[in-house]
Image (cartoon, grey):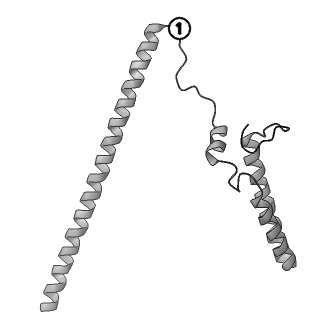
């Protein structure tokens, strides 16, 4: 049995839960602001009521994992491509995908090294400028 479901009720789809939370939040916020502006303490009481109700929503109170909600909204994509029926093509595709993954990881490594080099250059430039300014300040103070 999944979290948040009971044996007598069907599980509500996660996308419906997320949508209903968004609608409830929009309603609660707009009604609270309007009531506070028009009626003062009544608006505060409504805001407190909505906050108390908000804590009873499974997604907000921790009874609903965010990862579960996000995973439910993703389309179902198989982890491996289905066989095309042509073993030569399937072997070529597998080899090509492996090579592309390897090249992607190498490129990511290159980008990391490039960012590190840029950061080091900027830091060295900053330190050189700072030292130059300090020397200039010292020479002006001595003069």
Q: Can residue 143 be spotted in the picture?
A: no
Q: Position of residue 7 (x, y in %)?
A: 82, 37
Residue 34 quadrant: bottom right
Q: Quadrant of the C terminus?
A: bottom left
Closer to the camera in the image, 66 or 93:
66
Q: Residue at x 82, y 76 (%)?
A: 37
Residue 127 can be seen in this image = yes
Residue occupying the point 26% across, 52% down: 117
**Residue 40 in the figure: left or right of residue 81:** right
Which quadrant of the figure contains the N terminus? top right
Quadrant location of residue 97?
top left
* SS for dot 1: loop
Q: Is residue 99 above or below residue 133?
A: above
- Side of 97 where 106 appears, left or right: left
Image position, residue 48 (x, y; %):
80, 70
Residue at numbered disc 1: 85
């Amino acid at each position: 049995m999944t979290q948040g479901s009971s044996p007598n009720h069907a599980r509500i789809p996660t996308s419906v839960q997320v949508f209903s939370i968004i609608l409830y939040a929009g309603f609660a916020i707009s009604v609270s602001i309007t009531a506070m502006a028009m009626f003062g303490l009544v608006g505060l009481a409504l805001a407190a009521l909505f906050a108390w109700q908000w804590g009873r929503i499974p997604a907000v109170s921790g009874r609903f994992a965010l990862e579960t909600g996000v995973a439910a909204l993703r389309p179902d994509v198989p982890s491996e491509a289905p066989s095309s029926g042509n073993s030569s093509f399937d072997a070529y595709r597998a080899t090509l995908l492996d090579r592309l993954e390897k090249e992607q990881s190498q490129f990511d490594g290159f980008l990391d090294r490039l960012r590190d080099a840029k950061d080091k250059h900027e830091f060295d430039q900053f330190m050189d400028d700072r030292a130059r300014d300090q020397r200039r300040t010292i020479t002006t103070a001595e003069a």
